[in-house]
Image (cartoon, helix red, strand yellow):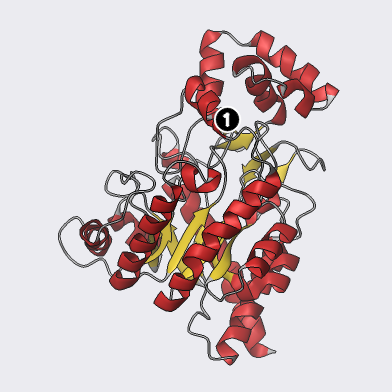
Amino acid sequence: MRQTWRWFGPKDLCSIDDITQVGAEGVVSALHHVPNGVVWTPEEIAKRHSEIATRKDGTASGLTWDVVESLPVSEDIKKQKNDWRGHIENYKVSMQNLAASGVEVICYNFMPVLDWTRTDLRWNVPNGGSCMRFDINDFAAFDIHILERDGAGADYTNAIADEAGRRAAALDEAGKKQLARNVTMGLPGSTESMSLEDVRAHLAEYAGISRERLQANFVDFLEAVVPMAEDLGLRLCCHPDDPPFSLLGLPRVMSTEADYSYIMDAVESPANGMTLCSGSLGARPDNDLPGMMERLGDKVHFLHLRNVKRDNSDVVGSFFEAEHLGGDTDMVALIAAVVREEARRKAAGRRDHSIPMRPDHGQDILDDLGRRSQPGYPTIGRMKGLAELRGVMKALEYQLAAS
């Protein structure tokens, strides 16, 4: 695996100098300042390449921009409303510009409205650190009593709805605002939340869009962009829903192995693949991560290795972001499946035999505490995770070579 590191740009508290010291080989980044639906120009792309390649003192970092995460799919494309066709054309131009700059892997997602959702961004864990958490009861309290979405109560079990009512009643105004801010934090790379009015407006735009309709819109998008991606030598890889179940009454179409199989079969191409995020998919107990890697590994173009610990076995339930080797996903078994897939690719002569991975998220520990970095992206917590994952990788690669 090629070891990479997520970087949000010059304002990221984790600098390029820091990334060289943690031992990463490449960088995962995006042009977060460019509005969704707008072309990524060659000039802006070249600027990001230069920023990644240069240390603070002006010397070469030795790092390269290996993966784009994300080239966003606009809400208009997902809904097929307004100027969605123009946005697709802009997406294709951005792909051309990225390919011309040397980038080969583009990660994206097809989640409506909310890119990822947590109810607590700094949840305390027993060792004194903190992590992100999704609590279904707190989320229901937001949905039913703060957002006051029509019909929200019917989307939860009676037990969850009752507990949500108790929790909402116990919140003062500051607590309600904090919960709303956490839930509507927005896109990775942003520190801005959407207002409740923004969320309600987005939900209204999705009225009448069923899961089947959203899935069909996704296929239409892929049919438009995948042929060009293949011609350009790009590998597109869709990130799973996070969490992998419906929220706010919105459909979600990339939550299970069956969802990925459907999309990759619908538009068959080596350019149409998946980002296997073990944290997002691992929030569902019915997702078998090592098995998914074995069965779908041929189309896995990017890996997010992180772990979550679920409160129970409910498909729609609560979880927190655990240490990389400490959650419900058997990370050793998953990495073993990756190592076997890479060996198969290398034997077949594939150029992409080394799959880019990054240690996704991490717990705030040591000097991370109090730094207020991008939620989920502390430097030391991720470095600890990378060290653990690297040890597992090396041991399994040695074992495979010796067998």
Measured as percent of width and height from the top left, residue 353 is found at 53, 81
Report the quarter where the C terminus lies.
bottom right
Measured as percent of width and height from the top left, residue 348 is found at 58, 91
Question: Going 66% across and 50% down the picture, which residue do you hit?
Answer: 253
**Residue 325 found in image quarter:** bottom right
> Which residue matches tag 1?
203
Measured as percent of width and height from the top left, residue 141 is found at 67, 20
Q: Is residue 162 above or below residue 267?
A: above
| Front-lying residue, 334 or 210 | 210
Q: Amino acid at mark 1?
A: Leu
Q: Is residue 305 visible?
A: no
Q: How many numbered callouts?
A: 1
Measured as percent of width and height from the top left, residue 29 is found at 37, 56
Q: Is residue 152 above or below residue 239?
A: above
Q: Is residue 125 above or below residue 222?
A: above
Question: Going 57% across and 45% down the picture, which residue do you hit?
Answer: 111
Callout 1: helix, strand or loop? helix
**Residue 275 found in image quarter:** bottom right
Question: Going 45% across and 71% down the picture, which residue do you hit?
Answer: 229
In the rendered image, the residue lying farthest to the left is: 58
Crowd around label 1: few <14 · some 14–19 · many ≥20 (10 Å): some
| Front-lying residue, 92 or 69 | 92
* Relative side of 42 to 209, left or right: left
